[in-house]
Image (tube, grey):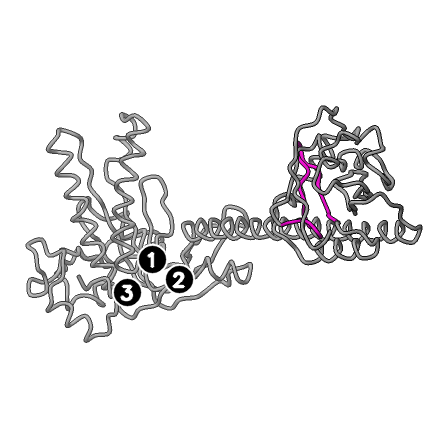
Amino acid sequence: MGGTHPRFSVAEADMPLLAPTNESERLAALHALGIVDSAPEAAYDEITELAAQICGCPVSHISFIDDDRRWLKARYGLPAEVTDAPRETAVCTTTICGTELLVIPDLKRDPRFENSPMVSLTPPCRFYCGMPLITDEGYALGTLCVMDFEPRQLSFEQTEALRMLSHQVLAQLELRRKLIEYHQTIRQLEQARLETAAERARAEELLRNVLPAPIADELTQRGRVQPKYTRSATILFADIQGFTQLAERTEPASLIHLLDEYFSALDEIGARYGLEKVKTMGDAYMAVAGVISPDRRHSIDVCLAALEMRARLDHLRAQCEAIGERALQLRIGIHTGPVISGVVGNRRMTFDIWGDAVNTAWFMEAFGVAGHINVSETVAGHVHGLFELRSRGPIEAKHARTHEMFFLNGLKREYSRNADGSLPNEHFLAEYRRIGGSRLALER
């Protein structure tokens, strides 16, 4: 070659387009590798150089036959700008239609290629030897070729070496395929991990919506919840007076909307004062404080929550009356005492509390008065220094038991920042902290 690179000025040739019988599958296999138009790689470059040296040829290349072109992955003895050519003009198009070495001692004397653009090059390409790169699945993706500008022959050892080098090209392609599969597997595993994490997060969020957060965490970590005995907790029962009569005359969707509005207000207020909703039963609402997050002053917290609940419901009632709708009132009962808490069921699990204190709290609500907060003697004993209470005297319950009951009217005047005694002022907060209260939600 005299150290100069040949100029490949390719022209169209009137040659029929050759293609293997499995052409569509072959192209799919080639495209799956993503090797066409890929960056140069040392492994392929070294194979082409080795092929040229072994065969004593000035030119060697590894090519892949795409839909309409021959593209060079690696080249030796060719200028860098020579990368592809129209498929119909490439001798390699014929090579991939066979399964063995295609050896052409003199292209100019072969009727198939005597008019090939390769023969018209300066200098003309006269000798060609190409090995099809056939995968284990039987797809001839491309070729490993050597070429010379003079007619010649290769020895048996040289052709065998070219075969073995083609196996190394195929090994590189197999590594590429496995790497692609590996990355796909990694992406699928990562996607599955993200979906599993998202599903787990949704499940945990749903669990936390159904169960108190500490209970949900214990269930997630241990698979079960240990029943817990609490020596002192404060239970609140509330129900909506006149709801049964309203239900008989109200369209179901409107009724559910009304309940949702009322109970959502109770949930929001209760959460700020440390109450945990236990359940709703029709128009009845049950919550507890001092079980999930023990606090020495949970009786005070529940009384504050009850006053704000009553005030909120009074506001809703005023809105209903203003537009001529039937107004409802809230009846609340509160008691403090020991309870057992836990989770029941293994499918639709629910957090619940049990004990005589629960029955007494229900009794406070059942024997209360609409628009009032009825508390037990125990609650009154815990909160009397901060709240206005009015004694109702002893009320007889089942089994000849009597209970001292009190109406919780509101905060004492010196501790309230509004006229109805439902919101504490700074004097209350100072006293509350002094006696051991710790509900930060009161700071606003």
Q: Which mark is residue 288?
A: 1
- Amino acid type, mark 1: Val
Q: Residue 407 vs residue 138: left or right? A: left
Instruction: Estimate the x, y position of residue 305 in percent, counting from the top left.
Output: 23, 56
Dot 3 falls on a residue whose secondary structure is: helix
Which circle's residue, 1 or 2, is located before the other in the chain? 1
- Gap in Å between the C-alphas at discs 1 and 3? 9 Å
Front of the two marks 3 and 2: 3
- Asked if the residue at tag 2 contacts the one at tag 3, i.e. Cβ–Cβ closer than 8 Å, the answer is no
- Asked if the residue at tag 2 contacts the one at tag 1, i.e. Cβ–Cβ closer than 8 Å, the answer is yes
Dot 2 falls on a residue whose secondary structure is: strand
- Amino acid type, mark 3: His
Instruction: Estimate the x, y position of residue 117 in percent, counting from the top left.
Output: 71, 33
Q: Neighbour class for label 1 at 10 Å: few (<14), some, many (≥20)?
A: many
Q: Which mark is residue 3?
A: none
Q: Is residue 257 above or below residue 264?
A: above
Residue 76 painted magenta? yes
Q: Residue 179 vs residue 420: left or right? A: right
Name which residue lies at 29% across and 56% down: 271
Main secondary structure along the magenta-highlighted residues: strand
Which circle's residue, 3 or 2, is located before the other in the chain? 3
Dot 1 falls on a residue whose secondary structure is: strand
Residue position marked by numbered label 2 in the rendering: 339
User: Closest to the observer: 257 or 185?
Assistant: 185
Specify the segment rendered in magenta. 60-79
Residue farthest right in this picture: 156
- Image quarter for residue 400? bottom left
Q: Which mark is residue 298?
A: 3
